């Protein structure tokens, strides 16, 4: 069963990712979508006065919980209305902090992917999910797709894959996505961002390695000598307009090698297409 997990916070980004997920589920044969809302109330909120100098009572906390449950139920109905009738919609409410709640649900429900909606500038509003998006993306045990706010779903026919041609074995992470009847199967645009031109080559060994690793995929090879990795990737994406950027796992992943600041910059500037972070 192909299962999609979507953390929600009722922000504009949540509303957009719900619409995106509905279209995505139709093209990728998703069978189940789980909407997760973290209802974490810290001990400080329970014991100390709030900004309005009002201490939260058990009654206040329970009343808020009921409001959240009602909103989550409404959101699930909206998603159900947009999806195919065969898709199961499930809701989950957790009192754990968001990242821990996601880890727990991954262990219990074994989703194939986590899909996160984020506002354009990441911290433009107070969306609870957006504030923790980098931590979630780095620590999730399953692939994470980040959907920028206002990005409308388009069938994923081409995907940009930034990679280090000195470590092409990382492309094996794409193996689980190659069945077109069950999951993603786009044409791959392989981009080697290499300002020092260490791995710009077309020798037989590289070609043979790619053929073996990408069996069943259609792909093209590109090179960039941009000194700024983020700029090189996003500039290529703007020119070629793929529907998705795929970040490979491991130490050679462009995503994992970036600093917190540059990851934030990359995701904030990338306002037109989703990013899939493989594991």
Image: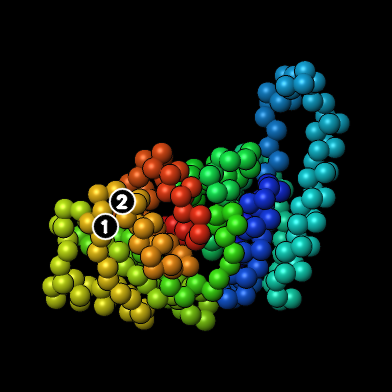
Q: How many numbered discs?
A: 2
**Residue positioned 48% across, 80% down in the render:** 180
Give the numbered dot on residue 34: none
Looking at the rendering, in which quadrant would you find the N terminus?
Answer: bottom right
What is the image's colouring?
Answer: rainbow
Left or right: residue 96 versus residue 229 is right
Tell me where residue 160 sits by quadrant. Answer: bottom left
Give residue 44's position: percent from left, percent from top: 68, 23
Left or right: residue 217 versus residue 58 is left
Work out whether mark 2 precedes mark 1 in sequence or the reverse, and give the earlier one.
1
Front residue of 251/197: it is: 197
Residue 48 shows in this picture:
yes
- Confirm or deny contact between disc 2 and disc 1 (CB under 8 A): yes
* Element on which disc 1 rests: strand
- Please say if 87 is above or below 227: below
**Residue positioned 35% across, 45% down in the render:** 258
Instruction: Determine which residue is flagged by label 2.
Output: 229
Give residue 212's position: percent from left, percent from top: 27, 76
Front residue of 124/206: it is: 124
Instruction: Determine which residue is flagged by label 1.
Output: 193
* Element on which disc 2 rests: helix
Instruction: Please rate how many residues cluster around mark 2, counting C-alpha atoms within 10 Å: few if below 14, some from 14 to 19, many from 20.
Output: many
**Residue positioned 36% across, 58% down in the render:** 235
- Please say if 255 is above or below 43: below
Residue extending farthest front: 239
């Amino acid at each position: 069963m192909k299962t999609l997990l979507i953390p929600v916070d009722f922000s504009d980004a949540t509303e957009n990712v719900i619409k995106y997920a509905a279209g995505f589920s139709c093209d990728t044969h998703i069978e189940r979508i789980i909407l997760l809302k973290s209802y974490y109330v810290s001990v400080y909120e329970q014991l100390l006065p709030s900004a309005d100098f009002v201490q939260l009572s058990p009654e206040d906390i329970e009343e808020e919980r009921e409001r959240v449950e009602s909103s989550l139920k409404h959101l699930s109905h909206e998603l159900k209305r947009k999806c195919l009738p065969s898709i199961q919609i499930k809701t989950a409410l957790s009192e754990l902090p968001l990242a821990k709640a996601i880890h727990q649900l991954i262990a219990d429900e074994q989703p194939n992917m986590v899909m996160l909606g984020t506002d354009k500038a990441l911290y433009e509003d107070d969306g609870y999910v957006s504030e923790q998006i980098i931590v979630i993306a780095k620590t999730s045990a399953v692939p994470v797709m980040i959907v920028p706010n206002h990005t409308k779903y388009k069938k994923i026919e081409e995907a940009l894959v930034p990679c280090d041609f000195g470590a092409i074995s990382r492309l094996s992470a794409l193996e689980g996505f190659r069945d077109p009847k069950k999951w993603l199967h786009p044409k791959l645009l392989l981009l080697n961002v290499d300002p020092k031109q260490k791995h710009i080559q077309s020798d037989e060994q590289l070609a043979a390695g790619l053929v073996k690793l990408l069996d069943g995929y259609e792909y093209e090879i590109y090179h960039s000598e941009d000194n700024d990795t983020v700029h090189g990737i996003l500039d290529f994406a703007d020119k070629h307009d793929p529907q998705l950027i795929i970040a490979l796992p491991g130490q050679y992943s462009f995503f994992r090698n970036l600093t917190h600041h540059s990851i934030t910059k990359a995701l904030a500037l990338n306002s037109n297409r989703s990013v899939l972070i493989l594991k």
